[in-house]
Amino acid sequence: MSKKITVLAGDGIGPEIMKSGLAILATVKPDYQIEEQFFGGAAIDHSGSPLPAETIEACQNADAILLGAIGGPKWDNANETPEKGLLALRKQLQLFANIRPIKVTDSLIDFSPIKSEIIRGTDFVIVRELTGGIYFGKPQELNAENALDTNTYQKFEIENILRQAFRLAQQRRKLVTSVDKANVLATSKLWRKTAEEIAKEFPDCTLEHQYVDSAAMKIIQQPTHFDVVVTENLFGDILSDEASVLPGSLGVLASASDSLNGPSLYEPIHGSAPDIAGQDIANPLSMILSVAMMLRQSFNENQLAEKIETACDNVLKKGIATKDLKGSATTTEFTNAVITDLKGR
Ligand code: NAD
Ligand code: IPM
Ligand code: MN
């Protein structure tokens, strides 16, 4: 039986870049079972819910999940929002570990707004806790004159994500940078203490701590310092969009979200980009590289993943790039260039 991939194209540029990702997948390995499901704003329009029962069931029964992006102004003030669907999906599948690689390949150096001597060699991973913290803490209230969010972490949640970060560091340069705000926040004080305890299980690795404000600065000032950066949900969200300035665009960053034993979900780190949707100008690299991450992590297809990454590199080296990287290629043209390169080898 071929493996099953549940596909959630979503909203805005989601369906455009998903089409690219699936075209690349079909080029390297055409025999996966693809099951498309409604999700996000598209699902609200279809059935009133951003995460219909059928969609969550298809995700639970998949070998891997591919997600484009969700959201848009059409649903921003509704009761049911696409974002609520995304958080519910992450929570229900227990996708607590979001892996966001920030790699500036030589092919991207000229596209970055940062000086080449600063970014050359940048290769780190942000490990973002994804099912806890202020995104999920109760109570949450919105009233006319006041509002309340709650940041909360259980010790076991911090232990789980720290272990995930150390295991990843063991396969890399063995440096874990734990990012918190332990000079102010109680959750961060528990985070830091727990990080120290988990570090003892990984004596081959080095643990350092950094406050989130100075980490935000250092990521741009000295990005080659970092190997594995582990942090809570909200800090990881913000730092990873910031880090996208290093390779030159949000449109090149992929991610994997992992649970302890269920299927992983692969998605770009960016959103549905309503400002450019429907114009065939979105950068599909984030989705194509998410497909490569899926092949490597979920299906052990290291060679196929590498083949896709090399093809993307080759295309960029030829100067073919979308508008976000100051190029003039459309989404379709960029995708076709990658397919041509794949078929040529
Ligand atoms: P965004 O990430 O969608 O866009 C930010 C900027 O980056 C925009 O100028 C956009 O054009 C550009 N951009 C993003 N991806 C690109 C790509 N592949 N190619 C070229 N340019 C790209 O963030 P936003 O505008 O703040 O949010 C838009 C919507 O997306 C909101 O509804 C938000 O909630 C949602 N969102 C969803 C996800 C997700 O599905 N995982 C992630 C982030 C935001
Ligand atoms: C992301 C997005 C989501 C998040 C939103 C859309 C809920 O920004 O995937 O990074 O904040 O996690
Ligand atoms: Mn985000």
Image (cartoon, rainbow, N blue to C red):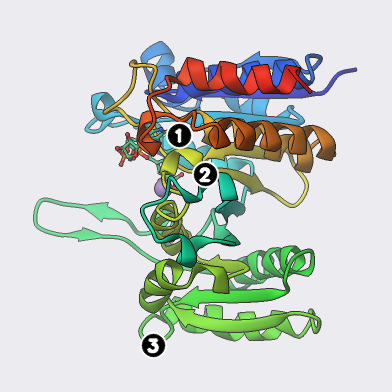
* Residue assigned mark 3: 183
Q: Nearer the viewer, residue 92 or 21?
A: 21
How far apart marks 3 and 2 lie (CA) works out to 31 Å
Q: Quadrant of the N terminus?
A: top right
Give the residue furthest to the top: 46
> Which residue type does callout 3 highlight?
Asn
Residue 253, disc: 2
Give the residue furthest to the right: 1
How far apart marks 1 and 3 lie (CA) works out to 34 Å
> Which residue type does callout 1 highlight?
Gly
Whether residues under marks 3 and 2 lie with C-beta atoms below 8 angstroms apart, the answer is no
Apparent side of residue 127 relative to residue 173 in the rendered image (left or right): left
- Residue at 66% x, 29% y is 59
* Residue assigned mark 1: 85
How far apart marks 2 and 1 lie (CA) works out to 22 Å
Q: Nearer the viewer, residue 271 or 147?
A: 271
Apparent side of residue 146 relative to residue 46 in the rendered image (left or right): left
Element type where label 1 sits in the image:
helix
Neighbour class for label 3 at 10 Å: few (<14), some, many (≥20)?
few
Residue 1 seen by the camera = yes
- Residue at 65% x, 18% y is 339
Q: Is residue 112 above or below residue 64?
A: below
Q: Nearer the viewer, residue 110 or 342?
A: 110
